[in-house]
């Protein structure tokens, strides 16, 4: 408890993130694991784990009180007005201390053990099974098969070991496609519709530049298209603005050339890069 200078502050106003005119009066509570704001009407309750706090900012004192802005790593922004400047200082100091964790073992998820816990922590690693998740899709089936081509993360260090790819493609095709994709992220299955045909795959941008081609990558995308016999078109969704994708061609990257890939339609969704998206959220 040495880190906590104050555990409860009354007469705190929460300014709604999406309605700056809405000032909700309540109480701010601080614990070793969370902060939470409870409105006087108890209809407004906000919880934020301490480890999801990105930064805490004190603003100049106003006639209405001491403003405090808490930025969350989940893009939430908590704007508070504390009536007493001393209380605001104590909250700021407390949150700043709680943000710093000397060792990973000090995180609440490691320190807290339920009194009736009947399993060891080591078993938590086996709670999630990617293979069992794919089995929920009815995999493997005649169109999709499991491959160990990324065993020991040999091809792509940001892909899991378990990958599903079209049954008709060989390992050489996968290797060739990975060499043509940024960071080796060749197209792999991420979701299969219950009808067993409509598939959602993911990949990185191709290293196409203005003229580079990859026969292996073309074969892999055609195999993905053929995995759904009810559709003759493969839709490629590129979340970037088209101008950004075109600019990347000058850097040896870019997007799929529809003159090379057969029966392919590319749709750009005009989402700016992560820095622009993050900055836009700060305007709220």
Image (spheres, grey):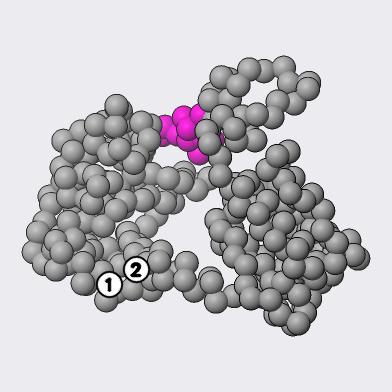
Out of 170 and 174, give the one closest to the viewer. 174
Q: Is residue 130 left or right of residue 156?
A: right
Task: Report crowding for label 2: few under 14, some 14 to 19, many 20 or more residues within 10 A (C-alpha).
Answer: some
Given contact means CB atoms under 8 Å apart, are the residues at marks 1 and 2 in contact?
yes
Task: Report crowding for label 1: few under 14, some 14 to 19, many 20 or more residues within 10 A (C-alpha).
Answer: some
Q: Give the range drawn in magenta.
A: 129-141
Name the secondary structure under disc 1: helix
Q: In which quarter of the image is the C terminus?
A: bottom right
Residue 265: x and y in percent read 30, 67
Residue 246: x and y in percent read 21, 72
Q: Quadrant of the N terminus?
A: top right
Out of 196 and 3, give the one closest to the viewer. 3
Residue 174: x and y in percent read 22, 39
Q: Mark 1 points at which residue?
A: 244
Residue 59: x and y in percent read 62, 72
Q: Does the magenta stretch include residue 134?
A: yes
Out of 100 and 155, give the one closest to the viewer. 100
95 up-or-down from 102: above or below: below
Tell me the CA gap for discs 1 and 2.
6 Å
Question: Can see residue 46?
Answer: yes
Residue sitting at x 24%, y 47% = 183
Residue sitting at x 69%, y 29% = 112
Q: Mark 2 points at which residue?
A: 240
176 up-or-down from 205: above or below: above
Residue sitting at x 71%, y 80% = 62
Residue, far front: 86
């Amino acid at each position: 408890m040495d880190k906590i200078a104050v555990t409860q502050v009354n007469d705190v106003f929460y300014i709604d993130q999406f309605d700056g005119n809405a000032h909700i009066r309540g109480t701010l509570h601080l614990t070793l694991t969370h902060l939470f704001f409870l409105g006087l009407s108890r209809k407004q309750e906000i919880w934020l784990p301490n480890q999801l706090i990105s930064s805490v900012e004190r603003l100049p004192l106003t006639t209405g009180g001491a403003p405090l802005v808490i930025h969350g790593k989940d893009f939430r922004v908590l704007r508070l007005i504390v009536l007493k400047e001393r209380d605001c200082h104590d909250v700021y100091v407390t949150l700043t201390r709680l943000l710093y964790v000397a060792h990973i073992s000090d995180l609440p998820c490691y320190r807290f053990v339920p009194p009736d816990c009947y399993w060891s922590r080591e078993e938590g690693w086996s709670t999630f099974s990617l293979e069992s998740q794919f089995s929920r899709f009815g995999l493997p089936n005649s169109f999709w098969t499991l491959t160990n081509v990324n065993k020991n993360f040999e091809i792509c260090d940001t892909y899991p070991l378990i990958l599903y790819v079209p049954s008709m493609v060989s390992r050489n095709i996968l290797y060739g496609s990975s060499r043509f994709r940024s960071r080796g992220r060749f197209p792999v299955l991420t979701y299969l519709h219950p009808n067993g045909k409509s598939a959602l795959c993911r990949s990185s941008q191709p290293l196409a530049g203005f003229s580079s081609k990859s026969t292996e990558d073309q074969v892999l995308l055609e195999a993905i298209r053929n995995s759904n016999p009810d559709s003759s078109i493969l839709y490629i969704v590129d979340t970037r603005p088209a101008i950004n994708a075109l600019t990347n061609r000058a850097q040896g990257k870019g997007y799929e050339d529809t003159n090379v890939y057969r029966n392919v339609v590319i749709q750009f969704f005009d989402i700016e890069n992560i820095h622009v998206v993050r900055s836009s959220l700060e305007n709220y």
